[in-house]
Amino acid sequence: MRLHVFLFSLMLSVGCASLPLKENAVKGLQASELALESAQTIERGLCFIAPTTESGGHCSNAMAATVGLTDARHQALAFAFSAAFGVEIKAATALKAWKAGDPAPSDVATYRADAQGILLLVQTLAPGSADLVSKAQLAVNEAAAVATALGVK
Amino acid sequence: MSLALLALLPQLISAGLATAAEIRALMASSAPGMTDAELNAVLDMVIASAAQHKALADKDAQPAA
């Protein structure tokens, strides 16, 4: 385990004041973000031969065709991912200032809707990738947990 | 000192020295009861990681040449 990770773990273990609502929301948002990142990583792995170095609107990997991932579908998913990550950044920023009793930040509801939109897109555009659908579903579930923690209807 | 280190983590993510997966594992195993400042530091990490992935998505959303 790297030093900074160890130090971070140590710091978390000695946290003091309890902020259960915000903590639940933060954990949910973090989990949703990770699931969304995983979904994007899987999609890029299907699209590119070398996803760590390649980018753009053209899929170089022959595997893309086997799950129905055309260039146009890859671009549509990338556009949706960009929008979702953008709203998530806004939601996280708003959550930093949020206190128990405050109205839920509107970006949380928007993010939940965006995550749901990505799930629908994935189910429609790349139905052959069960892993991708699974991660998108997880992102939705965790986004819903954030909304629930903050009292979003 | 703790918060100073926490504040550094978003930069570590941006530099590729820590990942959201690592942070997630730590969050899952941590004891409840984080302070507001600690929660905000975690949110800063979420923001940093999301920004990296958004940048990738923006490149991928461009029509093929």
Image (cartoon, grey):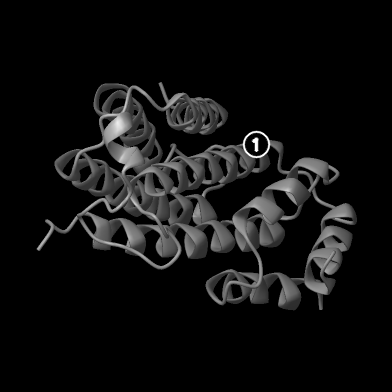
The residue carrying mark 1 is A24
Where is residue B28, by image quadrant? top right
For residue A57, above or below residue A112: below
For mark 1, does the 10 Å Cα neighbourhood hold few (<14), some (14 to 19), or many (20 or more) residues? some
Residue drawn at x 40%, y 39% is: A108
- On the picture, is B2 further left or further right than B23? right
Residue drawn at x 90%, y 56% is: A14
The chain letter for the residue carrying disc 1 is A
Where is residue A105, by image quadrant? top left
Of B63 and A82, which appears nearest the observer? B63
Callout 1: helix, strand or loop?
Answer: helix
- Amino acid type of the residue tagged 1 in the rendering: Asn
Residue A30, x across and y down, in percent: 58, 46
For residue B52, above or below residue A96: below
For residue A65, above or below residue A40: above
Q: How many marks?
A: 1
Residue B61, x across and y down, in percent: 20, 54
- On the picture, is A146 further left or further right than A117? right
The single residue placed furthest to the front in the displayed view is A62
Of B51 and B38, which appears nearest the observer? B51
Q: Quadrant of the N terminus of chain B?
A: bottom right
Q: Quadrant of the C terminus of chain B?
A: bottom left
Of A124 and A104, which appears nearest the observer? A124
Residue drawn at x 35%, y 58% is: B54
Of B25 and A112, which appears nearest the observer? B25
Where is residue A103, by image quadrant? top left
Residue B46, x across and y down, in percent: 54, 56
Residue drawn at x 25%, y 30% is: A68
